[in-house]
Amino acid sequence: KPNEWFAFDDENNLKLKTKENMEGELLPDKKFLCPQYNPSYQNPYGERTLSRVFWSVTFKKGGLKFWVIFTEKYGMPFLIGKHPRGNSQEATDNLADMLETMVQDAIAVIPDDSSVEIQEAGGKTGSAEIYDKLIDKMNAEISKAILGQTLTTEIGDKGSYAASNTHMSVRKDIIDSDKKMVEKTLNQLIKWIYELNFNTESTNIPTFTMWEE
């Protein structure tokens, strides 16, 4: 179910928020499974991985936005139109409209007493690399927050085979932690089924275990 439907009260009881009761209604016992990562009394919701990458994602989106603006501005040459002094505002506007059309269609018709110059936007390659480095840095921070490392997601000359194996072992630790959370949740379900059907506690309850050949 969508997590925004639910909330915990002051006693850490899970409640369902409804239109009639936004504070939440108590749920039936053994009705909902609630997998959590490192929950505590102060924070029953657990730790959220995506909360760690909020600023990285925000800066990445901002960097992409300004990079697109930069590319649009400096990715094509500037067209400079010149007209005789004393031209009317209407004639100036017409020349500007023709230059705008020329950027799209590469053709324009101008009066014989006007001129058009093409000026290349040179020397901006270094500035473009700033955005590239920003986005690469944010991607690395996002990878480290979610996977614990970067070498298994990035291709390049940034590490050796040994370093890649080390990074993969860190990622495996996170995978194993996720598997334990799945096992714990499903074993809770099995325990509830056993208690409801046999109305007794037992140490012989079957358990669920993630298995890989």
Image (cartoon, helix red, strand yellow):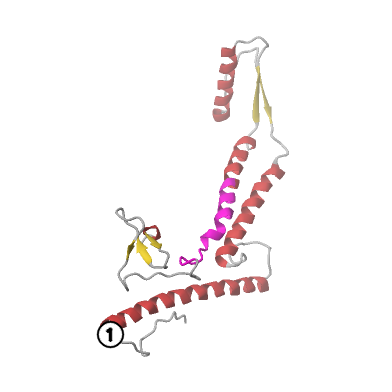
Q: Main secondary structure of the magenta part?
A: helix
Closer to the camera in the image, 155 or 19: 19
Farthest residue, direction front? 10
Q: Which residue is mark 1?
A: 199
Residue at image position (73%, 39%) is: 123
Helix, strand or loop at label 1? It is: loop
**Position in image of residue 83 (x %, y %):** 65, 15
**Position in image of residue 149 (x %, y %):** 61, 67
Q: Is residue 114 above or below residue 30?
A: above
Q: Is residue 84 above or below residue 65?
A: above
Amino acid identity at mark 1: Asn
Closer to the camera in the image, 118 or 4: 4
Residue 53 belongs to the span the image colors magenta: yes
Residue 28 belongs to the span the image colors magenta: no
User: Quadrant of the rendered structure where residue 56 is?
Assistant: bottom right
Residue at image position (67%, 12%) is: 84
Residue at image position (39%, 57%) is: 4
User: Quadrant of the rendered structure where residue 27 is?
Assistant: bottom left
Q: Is residue 153 above or below residue 162?
A: above
Left or right relative to 148: residue 207: left
- How many marks do you count on the picture? 1
Left or right relative to 146: residue 27: left
Dot 1, crowdedness within 10 Å: few (<14), some or many (≥20)? Answer: few
Left or right relative to 52: residue 197: left
Which quadrant holds the N terminus? bottom left
Closer to the camera in the image, 146 or 24: 24
Residue at image position (62%, 71%) is: 167
Range shown magenta:
43-62
**Position in image of residue 36 (x %, y %):** 45, 69
Closer to the camera in the image, 9 or 34: 9
Farthest residue, direction right? 123
**Position in image of residue 68 (x %, y %):** 58, 42
